[in-house]
Amino acid sequence: MLTRVAMEDTECRSPRIIGDQLRSTGLVLPGVPGSVVARDLVMPVLRAVRRGGVPWERWWDVDGLHALLIELWVGRRLSTHPREKVRDELTAVWCFEDDRLVDTLLDNLEDPFAFLPPDLLQQSATGTARTCAAFLVTRGLMKITLPGDFLSIRPGLADRPDLMEVAKRWHHRTELEETVQRVRGLSPELLTGLRRDFDAWDAQMSQMAPHLTAYELKSITPMTEDERYGEECLRAGWGLHRAELDPDDALLWHPDSVIGNCSVPDWMTEEVITCGTRFFHRQAGPHPVWLAAVETDTHMAAVRTLMEPPTRHGIGVEDYGDGLRLWFEFPRLPADPDPPFQAPYTYSLSWVEHAWELLHLATVGYARLSVVRLVGDGELRAVGSIRLGLPEETCARAKEAAISALRRLVGDETQTIRQRIALEGHDQAAEVAFQTCETAKGEDIHDELALESEVAEYASFMEAARHLARVRSRRAVALLDRRSPPDEDAELKAAAEARQRTLELLRAATGRGNGKARWSDYSDKPSVDEQTAFVHLINRHGTLQLAVCRTRAGHSYFDLVTCEEFPLVPLAGAVGEWTRQAPDHPRRVWHDYLEQLIAECGGPAQAIIETAAPQEFRRLVLSPTAPLELLPLHAAPLDTARTSTLIDAFDQVVYAPTARLVSAIERSQRQAAAIEVLVVAHGGGHLPGLEQIGGPLCEAHVIAGLHDSVEVLTQDKATPARALHMMPMARIVHVAAHGLTHPNRWTAGLALHGGSLGEAMLTSSGILADGVFSSVDLVVLNACRTGTHEGTGRTVQTLRSIESAFLARGAKAVISTLWDITDLQGVVFSAVLHAHLGAGADSHSAYADTIRYLREHRWRVPSEAGPVCAAESAIDAMLPDWRHHLDQQGEENPLFWAAFKITGVV
């Protein structure tokens, strides 16, 4: 009965359903509550099996052990009960529906060894075979002893002397026939007698065979060398398991048993979010687990079709780099003209673990496909698991490839497999961590730049991407104006479907699949110059990790650091509490929270310093993760007195989503700008909820006097459409206005001029729909919270604010803000920044000098010459008492300067 529980689990049935089946068939008392059966009977079995397989030497063969025990049970049962009663029990209790299989099981009534034919060396029907065998043995033409490898190719006989005798007699019979065929000149009478003896022996053996169990028949059948080696490798890997797969909810069940709001197991969430994988393979005890994350309604419809047996699916196999890739093809929908949805599962055969997992998959012949769905702003929902049978030809090719790889990697030392799996890859852990961040943080809008290609599929993809952005832009207008068109959801889903499908076709055309391949398989490997350290911050199981990439002599090197004393879960709670506070709270709660949070970041900052070795690098590029992307990491202290921060340790500290995006921006084709600076400024006040502020118009006036070539759009001329039309003409774009975040990340943006809030907002989706910034070197978003977001989705690991839209459409760098800034802070920052830019400074030098000016309170002593003097003079003309007010604001929040950050390529 316990193997029945394990066997039902291979079909992905839930503990509750398995328990209900046991109750319905009378194997447990029907009065026992189903929850008790699932908890106290089913789950203990599943835990044990998931950890170590089923309890026999072929631990991976759940169905095989169940079949063996049922056969033995039937034989025992038939000794005390009528055949028909046992037949009824096989149908009602054990749920066997195949009559031929039932008849085979019932043949256990007889003792199989009662039908064992004699050894032809000692006895035969006519005596001819016995006499002939004795003659051949005495003449040395036939050997009576068994070959030396007899037991090694039949390992199941080691502890079964009865089966050993069967195999020995079968060997003598085949050896006699083969020897006779080599001897010439035998009389027709002798050959006739031999044939009669062979036929009689075969007839008696055919009576015995049906009474043997399937396991016994397999035990006496010789194994090929590859089969023997494969089973030896699988036995050596017994007990190989992962701690994250131990919890009771670590595997999904059949979708019929998945509650609508069922949570996704943590390890699957980690793979999809932290590692960015959509398709992945694991091995949980006897179960080969395939993970698939679906994103669109078309994908979901294909999954639903797959889950309605007997739907057919396809499995393809191809060589992939140094490994093998298995393509699972979902059922094709009748009305879908596009190619079917495919999920790739890559096994890198330079790794013992992957080779061993592939061997295990090919041996059991099925995969447990677990499906999760991405919904909303990157949330995961459980769909369920189903069993996928693999075609025999697929299993044969996979097994051949796996065994060949294991012979190369392990050789005859199969007993070391578990140790090698535990130790392998440590030298590549940092590289793999960096690679997974590049995938996970490659937010969808960044694909549009990083996947740029000359193939026709890229044009189709960009057309679909722009169309989706326009649909989202119209939806953003409706959300801002608090109205909702009746067909918006259908249109949005259709546009998202089209973009996803064209993205799949583009990736297929350019060879960029979503399988978990080794880093060397990536043709678009990002480049990091020798003066730069690129640091990915990773949320791995609630603990912060740093994956650092640096380059020496043209080769990339990686480091991985785990900050054990920096748990992210409590920090996330603290950051959430901080963002809910009002900055102007009379008790300085917001400011005190901020100072505490920045102080907490000192540990990771020190780890970055130690790993990145600042004496070797001029530039530090940071790619944060939740919740750290809401904090000014560049202001993290390096000493208890907070006199030195991370920004002091390098010439440049900038942010970027991925190194791949940085590389894409650097190699993008740049256009010449017609004007040096475009200023877009709007002070609000024309719409409810947008109070009038004077800072933007003041900024426009100051900036206009600091550059020779400036175009200014203010107030009613500063519409979103006009701004997007003018921006491609400028080298520097400066926007000063109200900045508004929104729970819908495509709706966040900058409030310009319009008849309603929806018409006035320059949204992220609007920028993606119509923005072209290949001439723009720097975008300054001098408004509140332009570098932060309100999103709660966990899939997108990087920037979800308006700045990412500018980067995705070709801008090289963006200066944005992490929290609300005052009008005065915006004016002073803009004036000093543009004074340096107007004097010829590059983007980062101007930014760094401006931050230094604010942080060191240099306004207290008026400058007598240089760019800063020009900036201060311009501010003096507009705001004579500005130094006094800035002093007050600096006392209220000494970290006000840290709100400004720079992202992209400088």
Image (cartoon, rainbow, N blue to C red):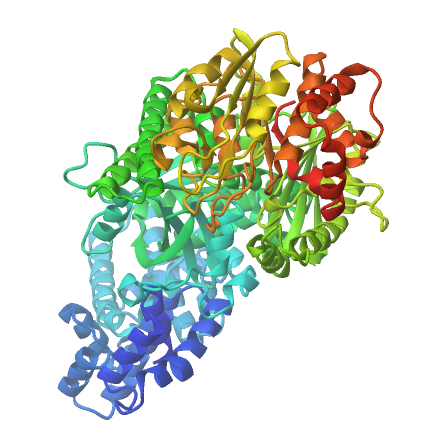
User: Exactly how many numbered labels are in the figure?
Assistant: 0
Answer with the quarter of the image where residue 493 lies: top left
Residue 306 in the image: state x and y as whole percent.
Answer: 24, 51
Residue 529 shows up from this direction: no
Quadrant occupied by the C terminus: top right
Find residue 609 and report its horizontal and vertical position in percent.
Answer: 79, 40
Q: Quadrant of residue 44?
A: bottom left
**Position of the N terminus by quadrant:** bottom left
Classify residue 249 as left or right of residue 243: left
Name above or below for residue 140 compared with residue 768: below
Q: Which residue is at the front of the view, 48 or 843?
A: 843
Q: Where residue 740 sits: x, y (%)?
A: 48, 40
Residue 250 is situated, as x and y percent measured from the top left of the image, at 46, 64
Instruction: State left or right for residue 202 relative to residue 437.
Output: left
- Residue 9 appears in the rendering: yes
Residue that appears at 51% across and 41% down = 440
Horizontal side, residue 110 vs residue 506: left or right: left
- Of residues 224 and 694, the one nearer the viewer is 694
Q: Is residue 590 above or below residue 634?
A: below
Q: Residue at x 28, y 38 (%)?
A: 492
Would residue 507 be found to the left or right of residue 674 on screen?
A: left
Is 391 placed above or below 621 here? below
779 or 108: nearer the eye?
779
